[in-house]
Image (tube, rainbow, N blue to C red):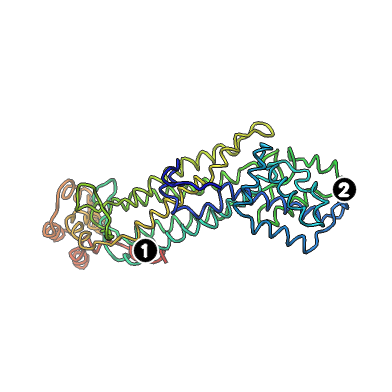
């Protein structure tokens, strides 16, 4: 088969970024789809051969079973090319797989007489929908989730290491109640862990029930076979969840649920990328330099947060595709139309941009170095944030107009430590309360931030 020159590829996933998403080729490529179709055809054949009321197809011997398993496990690019060559004549991809299998059966006398039981009573969608579920398991569970887990682990490490490093918050972009860098990172860890669990919980569904979901052809040939039971056993033998009701196509509701869950992870990570970009801009994070890298083509001093920008852009691309997939796939005119077919071929593109975003985000996290001095300087330049604890303590002791007094003292102006101390001295509150307020600094006013960071990043 011809190889793709990455410099001539139309998609950046197959060009510029091919190396970063190469692992998905074994899940979502044309080769992968063809291999899974062969796997599903064999699974159905094995089920038929094990049925008591199908005397024309005896149970497969261990030699025949091993032969079939070897055809799948050793399925090569050359095999896929052979299938494509048949498709060039048939103009039907699933029928080409059937013909390729029948040709292979000629090599084993036990199987050669039973070629007509390949694809028996099946519509193409019986094979395709199961194949798509297997592809999603391989690509999402086998590649995407491990990469997400690696990013979450990296973020958890940052959160633990910076749990006690105080940082000024900015609500509405304005100086606000202090926090710690670790707590802010731990928040993303907690959000991502939950969102990740929702991806893993989505059952990958598949059906095997004929042209419009009623087992019509099946019953006409063998009315005494429990076809729903055989269908269920076949699907579950592949590690998938049986979908008992469908028209010609599996309804794709689980796909919509899965893609929505994936988009939710990406949305959280866009939020993370933007926040971290902002912390780099404020100087709270420095970025480790890599020999030979250029930050700007004209400004030699710059180290741009390009990994987070790249990740944000790719998560956005992924979500545009994932949301279209989630909105379109559950909709099919009457018992079948083909609008889902071409769309489903882009599952790998959506997962690919998600994976690319994860890789870029992890690269960015790996370069981060916290700048505690800059964070402390920012805190010490915003003593007015202590208006909150002072007025809260005043309210505890019944000082009337506490909020209003602090608003008058601090709103819209810089406050010095001496000015706050002088104000505290005027308060009609117990001496020990005054002492505690005088000892307070912006860096010490972090509440339970460190405890929360350690608890939820662990």
Nearer the observer, 113 or 262: 113
Work out whether residue 246 or residue 137 is closer to the camera in this orientation and state it: 137
- The extreme top residue here reads 333
Circles 1, 2 touching at the beta carbon (< 8 Å): no
Name the spot of residue 407 as percent of width and height, x first: 20, 48
* SS of the residue under disc 1: helix
Q: How many marks?
A: 2
Q: Secondary structure at mark 2?
A: loop
Tell which of 195 and 345 is nearer to you. Answer: 345
Alpha carbons under labels 1 and 2: distance apart: 62 Å
Closer to us: mark 1 or mark 2? 2
- For the C terminus, give its image quadrant: bottom left
Q: Is residue 337 left or right of residue 144?
A: right
Q: Which residue is label 2 attached to?
A: 224
The label shown at residue 453 is 1
Q: Position of residue 336 (x, y in %)?
A: 67, 34
Q: Residue 125 at what x, y percent from top left?
A: 68, 42
Query: Image quadrant of residue 441?
Result: bottom left
Q: Is residue 276 above or below residue 159?
A: above
Residue at horizontal 28 percent and vertical 60 percent from the top:
290
């Amino acid at each position: 088969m011809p190889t793709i020159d990455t410099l001539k590829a139309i998609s950046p996933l197959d060009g510029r970024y091919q190396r970063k998403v190469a692992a998905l080729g074994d899940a979502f490529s044309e080769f992968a789809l063809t291999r899974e179709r062969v796997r599903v055809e064999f699974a159905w054949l094995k089920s038929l051969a094990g049925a008591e009321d199908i005397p024309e197809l005896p149970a497969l011997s261990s030699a025949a079973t091993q032969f079939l398993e070897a055809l799948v496990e050793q399925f090569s690019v050359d095999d896929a090319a052979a299938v494509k060559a048949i498709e060039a004549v048939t103009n039907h991809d699933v029928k080409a797989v059937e013909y390729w299998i029948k040709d292979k059966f000629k090599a084993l006398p036990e199987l050669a007489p039973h070629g007509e039981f390949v694809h028996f009573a099946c519509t193409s969608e019986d094979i395709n929908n199961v194949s798509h579920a297997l592809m999603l398991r391989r690509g999402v569970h086998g590649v995407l989730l491990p990469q997400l887990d690696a990013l979450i682990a990296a973020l958890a490490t940052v959160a633990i290491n910076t749990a006690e490093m105080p940082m000024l918050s900015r609500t509405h972009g304005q100086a606000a109640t202090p926090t710690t860098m670790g707590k802010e990172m731990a928040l993303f860890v907690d959000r991502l862990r939950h969102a990740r669990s929702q991806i893993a919980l989505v059952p990958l569904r598949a059906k095997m029930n004929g042209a419009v979901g009623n087992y019509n052809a099946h019953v006409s040939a063998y009315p005494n076979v429990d076809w729903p039971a055989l269908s269920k056993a076949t699907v579950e033998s592949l590690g998938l969840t049986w979908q008992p009701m469908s028209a010609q196509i599996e309804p794709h509701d689980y796909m919509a649920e899965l893609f929505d869950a994936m988009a939710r992870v990406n949305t959280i990570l866009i939020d993370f990328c933007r926040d971290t970009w902002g912390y780099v801009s404020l100087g709270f994070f420095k970025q480790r330099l890599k020999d030979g890298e250029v930050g700007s083509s004209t400004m030699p001093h710059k180290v741009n947060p390009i990994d987070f920008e790249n990740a944000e852009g790719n998560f956005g691309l992924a979500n545009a595709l994932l949301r279209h997939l989630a909105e379109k796939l559950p909709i099919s005119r009457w018992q079948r139309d083909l609008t889902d077919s071409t769309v489903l071929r882009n599952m790998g593109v959506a997962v690919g941009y998600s994976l690319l975003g994860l890789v870029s985000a992890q690269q960015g996290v790996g370069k981060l170095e916290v700048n505690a001095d800059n964070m402390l300087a920012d805190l010490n330049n915003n003593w007015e944030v202590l208006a909150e604890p002072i007025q809260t303590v005043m309210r505890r002791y019944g000082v009337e107009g506490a909020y209003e007094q602090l608003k008058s003292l601090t709103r819209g102006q810089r406050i010095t430590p001496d000015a706050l101390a002088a104000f505290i001295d005027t308060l009609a509150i117990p001496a020990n309360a005054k002492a505690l307020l005088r000892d307070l600094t912006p860096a010490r006013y972090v509440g339970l931030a460190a405890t929360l960071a350690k608890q939820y990043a662990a």
